[in-house]
Amino acid sequence: MTNFTEQLKLNLKRPIVFFDLETTGVHVGVDRIVEYSFLKVMLDGTTAGLTRKVNPEMPIPLTSSLIHGIYDEDVKDEPTFRQQAKNLANFLEGCDLAGYNCIKFDIPVLMEEFLRAGIEFDFEGRKVVDVQNIFHQMEQRTLKAAYKFYCNKELIAAHSAEADIVATYEVLLAQLERYANVEIEDKDGKKIIPVQNDVEALHKFTSLRDNVDFAGRMVYDEQGREIFNFGKHKGKLVEEVLNNEPSYYDWMMNGDFPLYTKKKLTEIRLRKFNK
C-alpha cells in the first residue's frame, strides 16, 4: 500500500477504513463477495491494508468475471466469508467507513455477508463517508473520471478492489483541498460549506439520511416515522401496515429482500408489540 503521510492528512477522531468489494453480481440480497480490500487510515495518517479473495459458495457469472477478472478457478480454494468474518469484524472494530458508492452497494452487501455468517456487526454509530456522493454533488462524474479530474492521474487496474480504494482515498484528499471553504446552496436555499476535513461533516453530507434500511425499501417521513418506499403500500406507515395487514410481514420475511431490510422490519414490528 502507498503511504500518503506526506499529503494532506484526514482530520480523524478515530481510524477510518476505506473499502471496496468485488462480487458475483449487483443483487444485494443474493450476490456474494469474491474479493475485498480494506485500507485502514490511522489518526497519524499511516495506513494498514487487508486484501483477500473469498470463495462465494456460488458460481461467478461470466458477465461479472469479465468486469473484475476473478473467475471460479481463482476462488475455489479460498476461505468463505463465514471463515473470515470474525477477523474482518475485528479489523473494522472502532472504525468509521468510507468508499466509492459504498452506501448504496458495498455496505449493504457487507452487512448481508456478516448476517449470513452470524456475526453481529453493528453499523450504528459509525460515520460513513461516500466519496462518490461528494463527487456527484460537486462535479457529477465517475471514479475513473474523478481520479483524472482531482488527481490528474489515470486509474490503472480499475475494478481491482485494491486499486479502487487507493484511488478513492486519494480522491477524497484532493476533494478536501479543492473544496475547502467552497459554498453551495442546500435544498432549502441556505448557503453551506459541506466539504470539510471532518468525518462527521462528510458523513452528514454524503449519507442517505432518509433510509431506514440500506436498500431504501423503508424511509423516514418528515416526522421521522418509518414508511414503505415500494410496492402497494408505498408512502404508508410501516407500523400501520403491519397492524392492518400482518401477513405483509410474513411476505417480506419469506421474500427475496436483503437480510438487513428484514432485520429493520422485525425491529419495527417488535417495537409495535412492546408499546
Image (cartoon, rainbow, N blue to C red):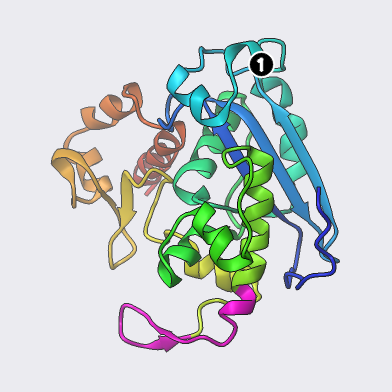
Q: Nearer the viewer, residue 7 or 41?
A: 7
Question: Where is 117 relative to 43, above or below?
Answer: above
| Left or right of residue 166, residue 101 in this image | left
Total numbered circles: 1
Question: Where is 218 relative to 221, above or below?
Answer: above
Residue type for callout 1: Asp
How far across and how far down the image is residue 237, in percent?
A: 23, 51
Q: Residue furthest left?
A: 232
Q: Nearer the viewer, residue 139 or 258?
A: 139
How far across and how far down the image is residue 127, in percent?
A: 60, 60
Mark 1 lies on residue: 74
| Left or right of residue 228, residue 26 in this image | right
Residue 66 visible in this rendered orientation of the protein = yes
Q: Secondary structure at mark 1?
A: helix
Question: Where is 166 relative to 90, above or below?
Answer: below
Query: Residue 190 magenta-drawn?
Result: yes
Residue 18 visible in this rendered orientation of the protein = no
How far across and how far down the image is residue 179, in percent?
A: 56, 79
Residue at 66% across, 23% down:
54
Report which quarter residue 195 is drawn in: bottom right
Query: Residue 10 magenta-drawn?
Result: no
Residue at 32% across, 53% down:
219
| Left or right of residue 93, residue 196 in this image | left
Residue at 51% across, 84% down:
193
How far across and how far down the image is residue 131, in percent?
A: 54, 60
Q: Which residues are magenta?
A: 176-192
